[in-house]
Image (cartoon, rainbow, N blue to C red):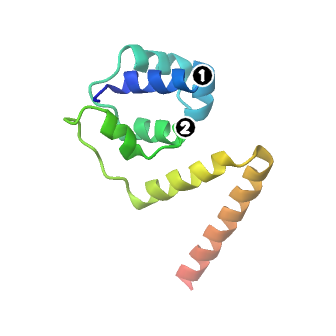
Amino acid sequence: MNMNIGEYVSSEKEARGLTLEKLHEMTGIRPQHLSRLIKHPPKTPDSDTVQKFALAFQVQPAEIWKKLSSDLPQPAMTLDQRISARISRHLAALPPDKQERAVNALERTAQDFAEMATA
């Protein structure tokens, strides 16, 4: 079924019982912009917006693009976008107290890899 980004966000928002404020917390998109996106969706959403909703709804961006019009371009995700999406989904599943510890561990690991690459 093809739909626009506004219809997709609206259906996911309602299915998950989310308010615009909660969706704002999950995506970083202000409630006013979310409302406008739902009521007056762009013909072609930008890939950053699709990425934000993919992270919020814990789905792959490709799943969202499939639900949107097949005429729209489906940009390939870069490696860092794919890694970021996976990490974000895993972090979102952790309790808040463990999220900070996981982020710190990831940062230490990234620093170790950077040091190995320059050695």
At label 1, the amino acid type is Gly
Q: Nearer the viewer, residue 61 or 33?
A: 61
At label 2, the amino acid type is Ala
Q: Position of residue 51 (x, y in %)?
A: 44, 42
Q: Secondary structure at mark 1?
A: loop
Residue 111 vs residue 3: left or right?
Answer: right
Residue at the bottom extreme, as displayed: 119
Considering only vertical position in the picture, is 3 above or below 82? above
Q: Report the quarter where the C terminus lies.
A: bottom right
**Mark 2 residue crowding within 10 angstroms, few (<14) / some (14–19) / many (20+):** some
For marks 1 and 2 on the same chain, the one whose residue lies earlier in the sequence: 1
Q: Position of residue 101 (x, y in %)?
A: 76, 57
Considering only vertical position in the picture, is 11 above or below 80? above
- The quadrant holding residue 28 is top right
Name which residue lies at 38% across and 21% down: 7
Q: Which residue is mark 1?
A: 17
Residue 35, labelled with which disc?
none
Name which residue lies at 55% across and 34% down: 27
**Mark 1 residue crowding within 10 angstroms, few (<14) / some (14–19) / many (20+):** few
Q: Report the quarter where the N terminus lies.
A: top left
Cα–Cα gap, marks 1 and 2: 13 Å
Q: Position of residue 15 (x, y in %)?
A: 53, 24
- The quadrant holding residue 26 is top right
Residue 56 vs residue 95: left or right?
Answer: left
Q: Secondary structure at mark 2?
A: helix
Name which residue lies at 36% across and 27% down: 5
Name which residue lies at 58% across and 82% down: 116
Q: Position of residue 67 (x, y in %)?
A: 33, 34
Q: Which residue is mark 2?
A: 56
